[in-house]
Image (tube, rainbow, N blue to C red):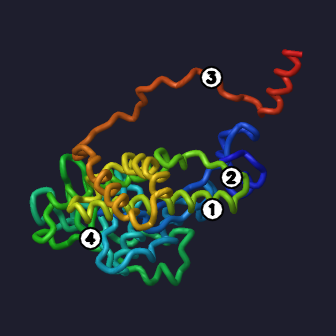
Amino acid sequence: MPDTPLNQRAYPQSKIQKPGLGFPKIRLVAMLSLSCGALLNFATGPCRGKNTGEHALLRQILDSLTTGDVLVADRYYGTYFLIAELIQRGVDGLFKLHGNRKTPNSQRTKLLNKDHSIVWSKPQRPAWMNEDTYQTIPAQLTLRQTKIKGKVFISTFLDFKTVTYKDIGQLYRQRWLIELDLRSIKTVLQMDVLRCKAPEMILKEISVHLLAYNLIRTIMAQAAYRHQRSPRSISFKAAVQLLTAFEPILLLTPRIRRQLLYDSLLKSIVIHRVGNRQGRREPRALKRRLRQYALLTQPRPIMQNRLAKYYA
C-alpha cells in the first residue's frame, strides 16, 4: 500500500527494509468455497506484531464453519489446537503433514496400506492461549494419516471405508483451486497493490474488491446452474472481460429487454471454459523478463534532490 505515515503505523513494513524504501503490507487470510470459489469470510492484520499470524487471523473467522463442513488447508495449518477446535465444532479437516511433525510408530494403528490411525498427544500450552481454553482441549486426538505418492496427509476422516485414501488425495489436489482464486483476486481484479493512503480506506478498498469478486462469482454460478455446468469449469478472467463488454449495453438497454440480454451474457460466460487443471506442476519462476531498473537505495525525496542538482 502507499508509503504514508498513517499506513506505516497501522501496517508496518518489513524490518529488513530501511525507512523510506519499503512499503506497508497487510496480511489477509481468506476462507473460500471449494464448490464455486466464493469468498465466505476474511480477516486482515499487519504482517508483524502480536496475534497477527495466519493462525490468529483464521481463528477470527472460524465461526463461518458449521457442522458438516470440511476445511482443506496446506501444511502450515495442520496443528493440534486447530484440529481440536474443528472437531469440537463438528468440522472435518484435511491437511498435508508438516515435515517437522513426527508420529511415533507405537502410536499408529495400521488400517490399510499407507493408511494409519494415529494418536497425537496435546502439546504444551502456547503463549497466545489462556489456561481455561487449554483445559477444554482433549489430551489426545485420534486422527488419520495417509501417505500418497510420498506425501503425507493428516485428516479427521476416521472411517476409511467411507472415505478412501484415493478420496483424500483427490480432495487435497483440489486445494490448488484456492491459489487460483487468490490469484484472480490479486491479479485479475488488481488488488495486489492497494492505492488508499489511510488504514480505514485500505480496509474499504479491500472490502470493495472482495465484494466485486463475490458478485462476479455469483453471476458465474447463475450461468453454471442455468446451463448445467460446474462453476469451477468456467473461466473467471473471461467472465470479467464479458461483464466489462456487456456493461455499457446493459445500462442503455430498456428494462423490458434487459433480461434477454442478461441471458445472452450468461450463455457467453458458460462458453469460456478452463482447461483440465488436474495434476499440474509449475516451476516457481517467471518467463517474462522484467525491465532492468536499479533498486531505490535512498528515500525518493533525497534521490529527487540529487537529480535536480545534476540537471540544474
Q: Are marks 4 and 3 in contact (CB under 8 Å)?
A: no
Type of amino acid at the residue the image marks with label 3? Tyr
Residue at the farthest top position: 311
Q: Which mark is residue 204?
A: 1
Q: Are marks 3 and 2 in contact (CB under 8 Å)?
A: no
Lower sequence index among marks 3 and 2: 2
Q: Position of residue 298 (x, y in %)?
A: 76, 30
> In percent of the image, x 56 and y 55: which residue is there?
27
In-image side of 226 versus 245 (left or right): left
Lower sequence index among marks 4 and 1: 4
Which residue in the protein does label 2 denote? Answer: 196
Q: Are marks 1 and 2 in contact (CB under 8 Å)?
A: yes
SS class, disc 1:
helix
Q: Residues within 10 Å of mark 2 (few under 14, many from 20)?
A: some
Q: Which mark is residue 148?
A: none
Which residue in the protein does label 3 denote? Answer: 293
Type of amino acid at the residue the image marks with label 1? Lys
